Image (spheres, rainbow, N blue to C red):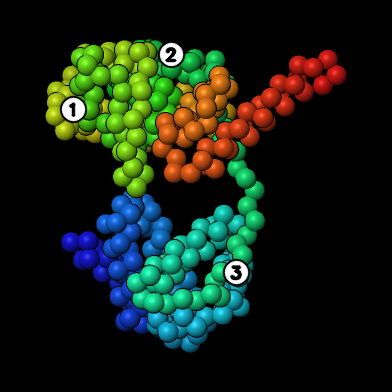
Amino acid sequence: MVETEGKERLSRFSLSLAADAERAARAWLQALAQQRRASEHTLLAYERDLAHFARFMTGHLGGPVSLRDLAELKPADFRAWLAHAKRNGDSPRTLARRLSAVRTFYRWLKRHENIDNPALTVVRGPRLPRALPHPLPEERALELLEAALVEARPAADGEDAPWVGARDTAVLSLLYGCGLRISEALGLTAAQAKPLLDGTQDHLVIKGKGGKERLVPVLAASIGALRRYAALCPYELAGGEPFFRGVRGGPLNARVVQRLMAQLRGWLGLPETATPHALRHSFASHLLAHGADLRVIQELLGHASLSTTQIYTEVNAAMLKRVHARCHPRG
């Protein structure tokens, strides 16, 4: 099944890749899906970036690209591709992503096709500014959770009912109280939530990116929000069915939560950076500000590398500087 999907996914490459290179690219995507458990979004991104590279090289070399061509490309060839993409409007971040996808493909080729092209190692990607996350101040995060429960507020998915407000509060409580990604919160099943509801468990086992599992404690306030939603929800919440439901009873869509946050931004005068993911950033930043160990935060967030988590130390330093400049008599 996966191989069939891979063939369909790469059918557009037939004019850009020779048969041997197309076979390798198909096998690479299959490995990403099966072994690394890459999401559909990630697979599509890799596909687009490799297709972009293959199309350019076809014109650059004058014909479909073979494995031998891939092995013999020079640094100037890779740089010509990046320069072409830049002239056509690719941002530095897009260029870096495209280059990363091609590097990943070449690493796979080295392991499975015995193709090693050192030319790619000397090609440098664009220098990117380090983007800092934008957590909410603690008082605004709590205010947002309270506002989500206001029953007079028109619901983000078109229905004004007490259970919808309870559901919205429960979702946001997991994003902020547990640092979950929106996909992780909406992927919660009724069976996973049941031990929290009946008091036999105070934590969740979350399967994050790459299938990596982590244990996440759930605050009493968040458990209370889940119980209130479960008591009011008009749909049966049982077994492997989604715990969070839309107004028609199907799985709650992430777009509904995004619309909810946009609505609350307008109500509370929050910046555009106040997105569902900003609550995850707020979770980490607020824990750090209250003395939590960085490695503990890494485990709670499910980051593979501590360097990813360390960005929150820069956020807190930036916040300290702003407070110092605003509050000091000579600021």
Q: Earlier in the sequence, mark 3 or mark 1?
A: 3
Quarter in which the N terminus is drawn: bottom left
Q: Residue furthest bottom?
A: 62
**Residue 69 vertical placement versus 107 (above, below):** below
What label does residue 53 carry, if any?
none
- The location of residue 127, given as percent across then percent down, is 65, 56
Check whether the beta carbons of the residues at disc 3 and disc 2 lie within 8 A of each other.
no
- Most foreground residue, 192 or 5: 192
- The location of residue 232, given as percent across then percent down, is 23, 14
- The location of residue 132, given as percent across then percent down, is 60, 38
Q: Nearer the viewer, mark 3 or mark 2?
A: 3
What label does residue 146 carry, if any?
2
Q: Within the image, what quadrant is residue 330 found in?
A: top right
Residue 168 makes an appearance in the image: no
Q: Amino acid at mark 2?
A: Glu
Q: Is residue 76 left or right of residue 299?
A: right
Which residue is disc 1 drawn over? Answer: 191
